[in-house]
Image (cartoon, helix red, strand yellow):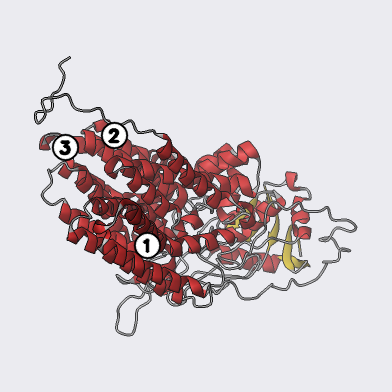
Amino acid sequence: MATTIDTRTGEPPAPLPHRSPWPRRTAVGGLLAGTAVLYLWGLSASGWANAFYAAAAQAGAESWSAWFFGSSDPANAITVDKTPAALWVTGLSVRLFGLSSWSVLVPQALMGVATVALLYATVRRTAGTAAGLLAGAVLALTPVAVLMFRFNNPDALLTLLLVGAAYATLRAVEAGRTRWLLLAAVLVGFGFLTKMLQAFLVLPVFAAVWLAAAPVAVGRRVRDLLPAGVAVLVSAGWWVLVVELWPADARPYIGGSQTNSVLELVFGYNGIGRLTGDEVGSVGGVVATPGGSPTGGTWGRTGLTRLLTGNLAGDASWLLPAALVLLVALLWWTRRAPRTDRVRAAALVWGGWLVVHVAVFSLMAGIFHGYYQVVLAPAVGALVGIGAVVLWRRRAGLAARVVLAAVLAVSAGWAFVLLRRAPDWQPWLAWTVLALGAGGAAGLLAVHRLNRAAAAGVLGVAVVAALAAPAAWSLATAASPHRGAIPFAGPADGRPGGGGIRIGGGPPDGGTGPRDGAAVDGPDPMGPGGPGAGQAGARPGGAGQGGAIPGDGVLFGGNLLGAPPPPAAVNALLQQDAAAFTWAAATIGSNSAAALQLGSGEPVMALGGFNGTDPAPTLEQFQQLVAQQRVHYFVGDAGRSNTASGGSDEAHRIGLWVEATFTPVSIDGTTVYDLTRPR
């Protein structure tokens, strides 16, 4: 083999110094270990977290059919209102390790650690180890990420799959390999099986970057999109096709739809309706101002500043301005780079991801929750990591230093604004971050004149100034239990006020784990001589967690967004003779059913699905089930109705029929009807 000669000296080049991999491995190990501690510590304090999904995981652990369809109960009455990929994970966990808070929530935390690791690996390939570590730290310390990787909503798996798809896309662009493009397509397809059309928001971005930057001929770039499109269609559509072709009378009703159709769910309630606000069977929608402009109704005012205002701002916006500025800087500094430049391709992937999601979340008029913003965190982290490191390497130039200083100043200033919106929570932190930001920005302007040690000190101050506020907010998030349908990030006593809503995500409203119902001693409480005989059940009232939706905070049959634990006597009652019935009980709404099912361990039918507005079952179908003695009890407020958005009123009709046909009794303040004993 010929020896390469240095043409300037005429001598062979000096060997490169050997760099030990251990500092890098130690840093990465520290990042992932710290993330694991943050996401796992005290996890069981949240109990079932979202009982709606916990009960579905319980059902999937008991019935493979319920696991496949994503049913709310093991007897397969109705599915959850999402595709079931996330439930496949938690259902298997519960099947393997038994039903507990840990078996439901640990998979989410591990997904979070895996997402941080994958983002690190993706960014490292673009801009090096330091950029990967910074990107991973930003993701790990984004408050909404801490919230959702400690919670059992589908968003944790969706975020992991989309980061994996971004990694595969950049590998495809880097090497021009079709197989990486196909992998990206399959991962997005499984993202669809996790949370439907939201997963597809990244598809135009990934396809555009492949077309713009892949190192192959233009014909090949266009041609390879065809098999990638097929891969998306197959990986996303196989489950939909199976369910649509399955005989409707041999599978559970598709929750969230009005016609028992997955396609309606995909394109209606969970699809176009989320953008327009026209969601049949929902609990809120578009509300017009007197001038006629939409406000987002129950789900907050729409507009391009939506994510920077009110309750939403503390979730993921801490470094959002920095990410957008760094995106522009990266595109400017790479404007003359070759078409296949890696840094520009990565900036386009993560920047496109971020801009598309921010635009959709800001303008959508339908159901919107702050925790959706978890998908912003990887893009923000990647842009901050890549942009900060690329500009740091260019710090000899004035423009790079000015941009770095401006980014830090803006980040510290925005953190100050957010923290001052909650003035009673750690008031010293806002001023500390502001001072560190000012000092760090001044140091960055002069960093080119400093020696290595001093420059490292400035860099350390800058990182602390940028991450201190979101890190503190994230620690407070991890320290607070989160239960209900709409959790929120941050300290319970420091949530910034203003726009948006806060329903079902406040102080814990559910159990901390499985509850064993004690046996009922003495007379049968439902019998003629029992203590509940002839008592009209009082409907437990009380406000919910700041909710504005009718029925929020009411116990069984009226609690729309939370699942307070049922009394032990009710659990025990449902367990009596449960083996003789297909469903131990029925109640209106999925959260009430979930609480009863998790508490008793017996199948409970959710009449009307999540909102009580699905036509499942119809009154005639329910009457037939009762006549066949397949449902033992009806629990809760039989007369509740929630059809303001045009959904079915079958659950209300069933409740009225139960009220007229059976005698209510009160068990520890909960109204119960024995459906085997008509008046």
Labels 3 & 1 near each other (Cβ < 8 A): no
Q: Which comes before the other along the chain, label 2 or label 1?
A: 2
Q: Residue at x 57, y 68 (%)?
A: 506
The C terminus - image quarter: bottom right
Q: Nearer the viewer, residue 83 or 213?
A: 213
Residue identifier under label 3: 221
Tell me the amino acid under the disc marked 3. Answer: Arg
Is the residue 154 above or below the residue 230 in the image? below
Please state if 487 lies on the left or on the right of 390 as rendered: right
Please state if 630 lies on the left or on the right of 473 as rendered: right
Residue identifier under label 1: 274
Q: Nearer the viewer, residue 123 or 270?
A: 123
x then y, percent, for residue 381: 36, 53
Looking at the rendered image, the disc whose residue lies closer to the viewer, 2 or 1, is 2
Tell me the amino acid under the disc marked 1. Answer: Arg
Q: Secondary structure at mark 2?
A: helix
Q: Residue at x 61, y 38 (%)?
A: 95
Q: Secondary structure at mark 3?
A: helix
Please state if 348 lies on the left or on the right of 496 as rendered: left
The N terminus - image quarter: top left
Q: Which comes before the other along the chain, label 3 or label 2?
A: 2
Q: Quadrant of residue 307?
A: bottom left
- What is the tally of numbered marks visible in this picture? 3
Report the Cα–Cα distance between label 3 and label 2: 13 Å
x then y, percent, for residue 284: 44, 70
